[in-house]
Amino acid sequence: MRKFLLLTALILAVLVVHLLHAQTPAPVTLQATNSSAAAQPTPVTRASTAAASDDTIQLLQEMQATNAETLKKQAATLQALDDLQKTAAQIKIYSKRS
């Protein structure tokens, strides 16, 4: 019984040390920012915003077209798999009759 308590205490001590060691945070190093650069925000014009939104719309339309093509390919693949499954079921039925 004494050995069991000693072993349990030793395991508990090891777990506590491990947990305490695991919870110490790693040091965080931050770079100092230049105060003059941070004080001067870049002006945003309507032209640059409009151009960015046009580019975004064009990108989204291209993505939509790509997604539509992918969906068509997936539908064709699904149809082929359904046909294969039906064919396999027919072969299974015919093989049981023989």
Image (cartoon, grey):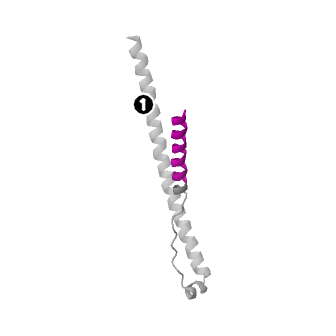
Q: Residue furthest bottom?
A: 36
Our reading of the magenta stretch's main secondary structure is: helix
When the figure is inspected, residue 47 is found, relative to residue 86, above or below; the finding is below
Local packing at callout 1 (Cα closer than 10 Å; few below 14, some 14-19, many 20+) is: few
Q: Position of residue 61 (x, y in %)?
A: 53, 61
Q: Look at 55% across and 68% down and name the residue there.
A: 56
Q: Position of residue 14 (x, y in %)?
A: 51, 48
Q: Position of residue 23 (x, y in %)?
A: 55, 57
Q: Look at 49% across and 42% down and name the residue there.
A: 75
Kind of residue indicated by mark 1:
Leu
* 59 drawn magenta: no
The residue that disc 1 covers is 84
Given residues 25 and 43, the one toward you in this image is 25
Quadrant (top left, top right, bottom left, bottom right) of the N terminus: top right
When the figure is inspected, residue 59 is found, relative to residue 72, above or below; the finding is below
Q: Look at 52% across and 52% down and name the residue there.
A: 17
Q: Position of residue 42 (x, y in %)?
A: 58, 83
When the figure is inspected, residue 13 is found, relative to residue 79, above or below; the finding is below
- Residue numbers of the magenta segment: 1-19
Q: Residue furthest top?
A: 98
Given residues 1 and 70, the one toward you in this image is 1
